[in-house]
Amino acid sequence: MKQAKVRLYVEQALGEGQTIPLTKEQAHYLFGVMRMAVGDPVLLFNGRDGEWRCCVTIANKRNGELLCEVQTKPLQMPPDLWLCFAPIKKARTDFIVEKAAEMGAARIVPISTDFTNSERIRQDRLQAHAVEAAEQCGGTYVPEVAELIRLDRLLADWPEGRQLMFCDESEVGSAKRLAATDGGSWAILIGPEGGFSESERARLRALPFAHVVSLGPRILRADTAAVAAMTLWQQAVGDWQ
Ligand code: SAH
């Protein structure tokens, strides 16, 4: 059987015998860029129905159709982890979203803090980055990228039972680590380039659901800190255990 060389996210329901009409952009990519033809296999997922092997049944420049044949992976949900971070420069924010999707965050929450340098985000663009990362890494789930929310509002509406891994740069070099536990609902919090303000820090440290954590003896940039924190969390609590 021919190996599928393309893996795509689609909105439509997937199931045996289902036909999937392609958008102009998808047809252009499959037939114009990837030079695929009728009969070629494509892997599809939609974040709900797992991954399906489909074959091309109509291949035109501006449209086309796929037929769903067999499920190749069940839906695999990531652990219930939110990555909350303060957006930084565009390329670095894109990087954080891409890595969060690859590393198995369930939801990505951009927050504005006292020292956040970027007050606006393009939520649709960031969501597209999460989709691309899921296509590329073989995931069957795409994390939602939430709208930018103020840190104080996020904390005021904090969901019951969700624990917080607070990465606090003032702990640089300290021995505060995340203890290994079994799953549950969690969030990681990473600050902006300027770090957290003293009032934010005091409020965060007093929260009963917060676990204050050091990320080692050096101050990491926010994008590095996000990847390091997700690694530690996945190892101690998540699905890398
Ligand atoms: N400008 C700040 C550092 C901000 S680093 C300063 O010099 O103090 C950006 C974010 O990454 C921080 O808010 C924190 O969430 C995280 N971070 C970076 N290094 C860290 C460390 N060693 N321990 C804990 N968190 C860290």
Image (spheres, grey):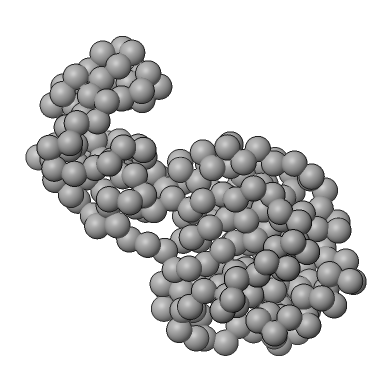
The residue lying at 19 percent from left, 31 percent from top is 19
Q: Quadrant of the C terminus?
A: bottom left
Q: In the image, is 189 to the left or to the right of 144?
A: right
The residue lying at 56 percent from left, 79 percent from top is 161
The image position of residue 65, as x and y in percent, is: 22, 24
The residue lying at 71 percent from left, 54 percent from top is 149
Q: In the image, is 104 to the left or to the right of 203?
A: left
Q: Which of the pair 79/160 is nearer the observer?
A: 160
Q: In the image, is 58 to the left or to the right of 99?
A: left
Q: Which of the pair 115/35 is nearer the observer?
A: 115
Q: Residue furthest left?
A: 1
- The quarter of the picture where residue 167 lies is bottom right
The image position of residue 50, as x and y in percent, is: 27, 52
Residue 86 showing in the rendered view? no
Q: Quadrant of the N terminus?
A: top left
Q: In the image, is 16 to the left or to the right of 129?
A: left
Q: Which of the pair 185/211 is nearer the observer?
A: 185
The image position of residue 33, as x and y in percent, is: 36, 21
Residue 48 showing in the rendered view? yes
The residue lying at 76 percent from left, 56 percent from top is 150
The image position of residue 106, as x and y in percent, is: 48, 60
